[in-house]
Image (cartoon, rainbow, N blue to C red):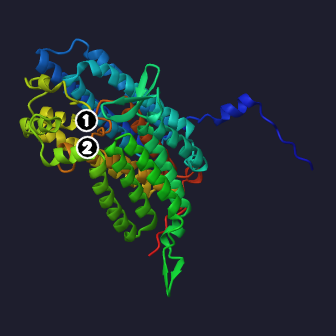
Amino acid sequence: MATTTTVLPPRVRAARQIPVWRRGPKPKRRTELGLLVFAVAITVALYVIAEIGAKGKLPPHIGPILAVILGMVLVAHVANRWLVPNANAVVLPLVALLNGIGYVIIVRFTPPAAKSQAIWVVVGIACYIGVLLAVRHTRDMDRYRYLLLAVAIGLLISPLIPHIGKPITTTRLWVGLGPIVFQPIEFAKLLLVVFFASYFAERKELLSIPTARVGNRLVLDPRPLVPILAFWALSMGIIALEDDVGFAMLVFTVFVVLLWITTGRWAYIVFSLVLFAVGAVVASRLLSQVHVRIDLWLHAAPNTQLGYGFFDFAHGGIGGSGLGTDPLAGAFSWMHITTDMVFAAVGDQLGFIGAAAVVIAFVLLVGAGLRIAQAARSDFSRLVAVGLTAVLGFQAFFIMAGVTRILPFTGITLPFVAYGGSSLVANYILVAVLMRVSEEGSSTRAERATGISLPSETELLVAP
């Protein structure tokens, strides 16, 4: 008996592609909502304290401010209920808390920038929802890895193109498209993570299992690593031309982390450390920015940006100088206090307790990201989650360690806390991809239909 195939009209097919609202209990989303309310309460409390300390009265516009903050987080929460109902419940509240603390610090030190930061938060949440709608399956990113690589190279090169790049001081990181000026490298680093993860997931056996014979012994074949090393060197060269040491170190670190997670071979770590040491020595001799940053690290003068940052931390003490009551706050508003040195501003206003709270929030965020990676359903998803978590964690570590003089000062932004539209939007996109990986790893369609927990689709096997 012949069967007939019904061809649906294009509008019907498009409608079926739109995710449906899944009814039923969503315990993770209930937990998320409670944590979001707690994060909003902390943000509003800090804002009120800052206003009372500065002006001696409650802000007259506290109602609209509270409504806007609640509205933004509720929009993101509803999007999670709709698009990723089973995803991790603590990622978005931690992001909201860090974002709120950063906004209060920006209002305190550079009030004119607060409005722009609020607009960028709205744009970031819109991009967050857009990524969740566009990336329905992480395998789609794997399928288009070379296209994403081409876009990443274009973004890396764009600041060097005349009439498009907008050099500021000695660095060439900005691109101007009409009235919008942004840092394309913030988005390029995410695409590079996707490409590295795809390449390593496909070639993990060749990279981890000895297949080349040298005499009577089998050793690792270096040939699969040559293309990715060549591209890594190209990326480092482009970033060096743009005079951006921080992002060069960040990309190198993420590359090494993904390589080690894929193979489990300590030989790669040793080789990478040697390569980093040689590169650091050469860069300190050839690149003036590297030499200057190392010199400032070793001999930080009191009248430099880094010296003022140390003074801010010392002035904050244990409990902080007080939001809105610090007479020295205006003295540092001319510096990059809400961008490069925002962690020092947190230490000044909120003291050791506030700075520790920010550090703990980042530790919890990194832990949630690694938990998402552990539960991922495929090698590619797992490596993407590890890579994106490494970007977030190491970027926060490098800037906080630089401000506290543990490492040379890199000048990259503190995720979600520092002022800056490019970084904020890119990090919201990063979190959206993490939430998609978390949703895929929480349960499969068959599990949700039957209620039976099935084993993972694939396991990331590392050679002994």
Q: Residue at x 10, y 15 (%)?
A: 56
Where in the figure is residue 133, as x and y percent of width and height? Answer: 55, 35
Q: Name, please, the residue furthest toward the bottom.
A: 216
Task: In the rendered view, tell whether residue 121 sits above or below residue 190.
Answer: above
Q: Amino acid at mark 2?
A: Ile
Where in the figure is residue 31, as x and y percent of width and height? Answer: 36, 41
Q: Nearer the viewer, residue 271 or 11?
A: 271
Residue 290 visible here: yes
Q: Which of the 4 image quadrants contains residue 347?
A: top left
Q: Residue at x 43, y 32 (%)?
A: 76
Task: In the rendered view, tell whether residue 12 sits above or below residue 222.
Answer: above
Q: Amino acid at mark 1?
A: Asp
Chain-order first, disc 2 or disc 1? 1
Q: How many marks?
A: 2
Where in the figure is residue 4, as x and y percent of width and height? Answer: 87, 42
Q: Residues within 10 Å of mark 1 (few under 14, many from 20)?
A: many
Q: Nearer the viewer, residue 58 or 236?
A: 236
Please tell me whether mark 1 sits on a helix, a strand or a loop. loop
Question: Which residue matches tag 1?
Answer: 340
Where in the figure is residue 55, as x and y percent of width and height? Answer: 13, 15
On the rendered structure, is 252 left or right of 295?
A: right
Q: Residue 399 got which mark?
A: 2
Dots 2, 1 in contact, CB < 8 A? yes
Task: Give the CA separation, mark 2 to mark 1.
Answer: 8 Å
